Amino acid sequence: MLRVSGSTVKVRRFLATSSIQPSRVFWKGAPGTPKSRGPINISGFNIELSGAYGIVEQAAQASQFIRRHKQDFLLVRSLGFSAATIDFGLYDLATEDRPWPCYRIPRPLVLLASELGCSIELSFYGMPPDAS
C-alpha cells in the first residue's frame, strides 16, 4: 500500500492529474474512525500496490506497479507531500525454533522507493490466519 499525506490542495492536484484511482482518499477535517478520536488532521490517499501475501510477492508486485505508473509516482514526489510511504502488511512468522525471522526488501525496490522519495514501512498483523 502506498500511503500519501499532505495538504488538501496537493491531494486535489494529484487526483485531477493522476491516472491512478486511489483505494481510499481522506480529507482534513472529515470525521475520523471511532479509533481515531476526532476529525482527520491531514488530507491524503492510499493506493493499493499489491494484493499478494508475503514480502517477496508483495515487493515484486509493488515494483511492477510503480514502474508501470512511474509518472504518477514522480508527480507525488514533485508535489512535495508531507509523507509518502510504501507499507507492507505482513504476518509475524516467528516460531519457537526461529524467534527472529528476517523480512528482506529487495534492493531494486529500495532504490526505486528512494528515487521517488518514498519511505518503506513494515506493518505486522500478528499470526497468519491459518496458524494454530
Image (spheres, helix red, strand yellow):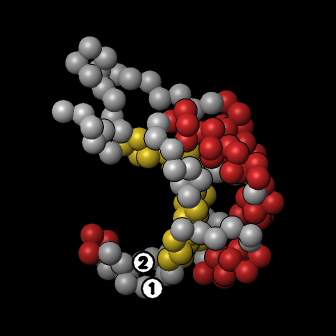
Q: Quadrant of the C terminus?
A: top left
Q: Which mark is residue 45?
A: none
Image: 95 above or below 42: above
Outermost residue, front side: 130
Outermost residue, top direction? 97
Q: Which quarter of the figure has residue 58?
A: top right
For badge 1, the amino acid type reads Gly
Where is residue 72? Give x, y as percent: 75, 63
Residue found at the very far right of the displayed protein: 71
Question: For the residues marked 2 and 1, what is the alpha-carbon distance in whole angstroms?
Answer: 5 Å
Q: Earlier in the sequence, mark 2 or mark 1?
A: 1
Q: Does any portion of residue 104 appear in the rendered image?
A: yes
Residue 40: which numbered mark, if any?
Answer: 2
In the displayed structure, does residue 111 sit left or right of residue 60? right
Marks 2 and 1 close (CB-CB < 8 Å)? yes
Specify the amino acid type for callout 2.
Ile
Give the left or right position of residue 95, taking residue 9 as reference: left
Image coordinates for residue 47, horizontal then vertical, percent: 58, 62
Label 1, secondary structure: give it. loop
Give the crowd class for mark 2: few <14, some 14-19, many >=20 residues within 10 Å. some
Q: Which residue appears at 54% of the width and 68% of the height?
A: 23
**Residue at horizontal 53%, vertical 75%?**
25
Give the quarter of the image for residue 37: bottom left
Residue 99 on image: x %, y %: 29, 21
Residue located 42% across and 78% down the image: 40
Residue at figure coordinates x 36%, y 39% from the top left:
91
From what the image shows, is residue 75 above or below residue 32?
Answer: above
In-front residue for pair 1/12: 1
Q: Is residue 56 above or below residue 48?
A: above
Query: Mark number for residue 29?
Result: 1
